[in-house]
Image: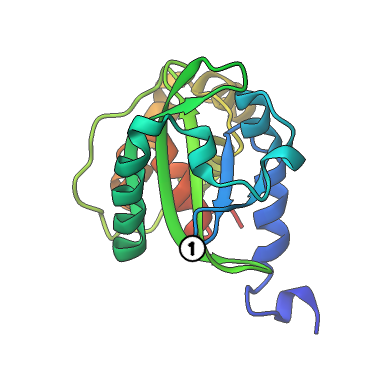
Amino acid sequence: MSMSQGPFGGWEPAFYAVFARTANPMVLLDDDRTIVDANEAIAALLGYSRAEMIGHSMLDFIPPDEHEHHRLAWAQLQAMGEQTVDRTLVHRDGHPIPVQYAGTYTDVPDHGPLGVYVAIEIGSSPEREAPVHEADVTPLTNRESEVVRLVALGKTGTAIAADLHLSPETVRTHVRNAMAKTGTRTRAQLVATAFSERLIA
């Protein structure tokens, strides 16, 4: 069976290509919150190698006083399919790293249902968007899809503007429109949703 004829319709290579290349720190968690895979971005953020993170509980990288909050948030993720919070992660040397932490629960190629988590360091992405409460049912335009793909790769608004020969304000408008259409409130949530809804294929 060819890749394009598989159950993910060609999504598998796109998923792993972006997961590996993105500058957005990401992990894949199983039902026990064990890390099934981690990308280089989150390994670098926390001061570990990917190999050191894979197989560990996500709780190993979260302060003990946030473990119960994480348990409740994980239950919400499994019940509702998505979840977004501000979270603290712990660097290898012990210093705290505040992040926007967004997750979706979705079928992942080769693994089945997993939690797909994105952790964007607070302060690393200046283009924080206004809250959006309800999704617009209008599909993304081609340009919005292109911008979402670049956001998913971890590019800043300035870099996206340069790549697409647009003004930064136009890029911000496309991001806001994409967030409105996907019902997302932060860039971390937009990236998680882009993966779960296959918006980057």
In the rendered image, the quadrant that contains the N terminus is: bottom right
- Where residue 92 appears, as percent x and y from the top left, is 62, 22
Q: Nearer the viewer, residue 106 or 9?
A: 106
Which residue in the structure is indicated by mark 1?
31
- Where residue 27 appears, as percent x and y from the top left, is 58, 45
- Where residue 119 appears, as percent x and y from the top left, is 48, 34
Q: Is residue 93 left or right of residue 182?
A: right
In the rendered image, the quadrant that contains the C terminus is: bottom right
Residue type marked 1: Asp
Q: Residues within 10 Å of mark 1 (few under 14, many from 20)?
A: few
Q: Is residue 148 visible?
A: no
Extreme right residue here? 2
Extreme front residue here? 64
Quadrant of the rendered structure where residue 150 is? top right
> Which residue shows up at 67% across the image and 23% down it?
47
- Where residue 194 appears, as percent x and y from the top left, is 49, 51
Q: Nearer the viewer, residue 126 or 172?
A: 126
> Which residue shows up at 65% across the image and 56% down it?
15
> Which residue shows up at 55% across the image and 40% down it?
152
> Which residue shows up at 48% across the image and 29% down it?
120
Image vertical order of residue 145 relative to residue 188, above or below: below
Quadrant of the rendered structure where residue 39 is? top right
Image vertical order of residue 38 relative to residue 16, above or below: above
Extreme left residue here? 133
